[in-house]
Amino acid sequence: MAEPKPSLDAGVPYGGVRLPARRKAASVRAVLALILREMSTSYGRSPGGYIWTIIEPVGGVLVLSFVFSFLLRSPPLGSSFLVFYATGMLPFLAYSAISNKIAAAIQFSKPLLAYPSVTYIDALVARLVLETMTQLIVGLLIFTFILTWTQEAVSLDFGAIGLACLMIVALGVGIGLTNSFLNSMFPIWTTLWAVLNRPLFLISGIFFLVEPLPEKFRDILLYNPLVHIISTMRSGFYATYDAPYASPAYVFTCAIIPAALGMLLLHRYHKDILEI
């Protein structure tokens, strides 16, 4: 018997197996569709939509600046409380938003994952792309507004700022992937993680610098990768601050390990998750 001829469809070669190019094209279409769905459900139908994502961090920075202006004569760096707390709060909120969005990606898109053309990876990528773009736009708008309003003399180091942004995304992805599996398999983990995560707001260096702290306290706080991220971000705004204790290698290690673990578990159990 003669062997069957290859399909004339360029995307379906011999044996009817799809070429990687066709799979990639389908994946891109799925990601774009998921991004549009996310934008519609998360922002299009909520009061204020995207505006609220800007108002919330601005409100937090203003409250911190107002309160601490009565307690301190000047911020630990520079002369503007707004700039100092913005360089701490915005990285923290961006990390929280990215990790939380990725952690909930599979549950959010679960109805669509029943379709063969949509995979759990598409759902994760869509949320990562949208939330990263959102946080970058929000950060750019807020920092532009604050620096223009305060006229704070800063010396922007875009290399350090870019590195801090990269660390934010990496850590958010790493924690988000692990939590995506845990949230899906053990719903109680969502509540437990929220409780465990609350102290981070106080110990991540948003309100202070780690350098003046006693060594034993500083060494403990430096186990928190967010301290390194915020210190690196501030070094990108203040020429006199070089963040001597910040270690990007440590942050990326803290990101890669949970990311690899999360992807391994999701790859192994994603079918079970969809059946829950």
Image: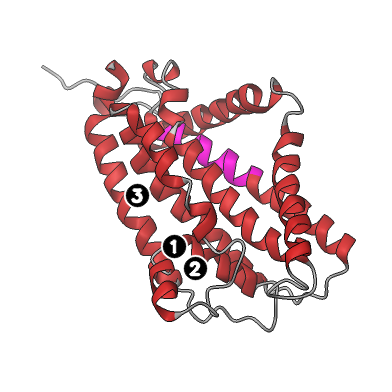
Residue 132 falls inside the magenta stretch: yes
Q: Which residues are magenta?
A: 121-134
- Disc 1 marks a residue whose amino acid type is Pro
Question: Could you tell me which secondary element the residue under label 3 belongs to?
Answer: helix
Question: Could you tell me which secondary element the residue under label 1 belongs to?
Answer: helix
Task: State left or right for residue 5 relative to residue 132.
Answer: left
Q: Residue at x 41, y 28 (%)?
A: 106
Q: Residues within 10 Å of mark 3 (few under 14, many from 20)?
A: many
* Main secondary structure type of the part rendered in magenta: helix
Label 3 belongs to which residue? Answer: 259
Q: Is residue 252 above or below residue 200?
A: below
Q: Position of residue 185 (x, y in %)?
A: 28, 28
Label 1 belongs to which residue? Answer: 225
Question: Could you tell me which secondary element the residue under label 2 belongs to?
Answer: helix
Mark 1 → mark 2, Cα distance in angstroms: 5 Å
Q: Residue at x 37, y 36 (%)?
A: 192
- Disc 3 marks a residue whose amino acid type is Ala
Contact (Cβ within 8 Å) of mark 1 with mark 2:
yes
Q: Residue at x 35, y 57 (%)?
A: 256
Res. 18 in view: no
**Residue sitting nearer the eye, 7 or 229:** 229
**Residue sitting nearer the eye, 191 or 135:** 191
**Residue sitting nearer the eye, 269 or 69:** 69
Label 2 belongs to which residue? Answer: 228
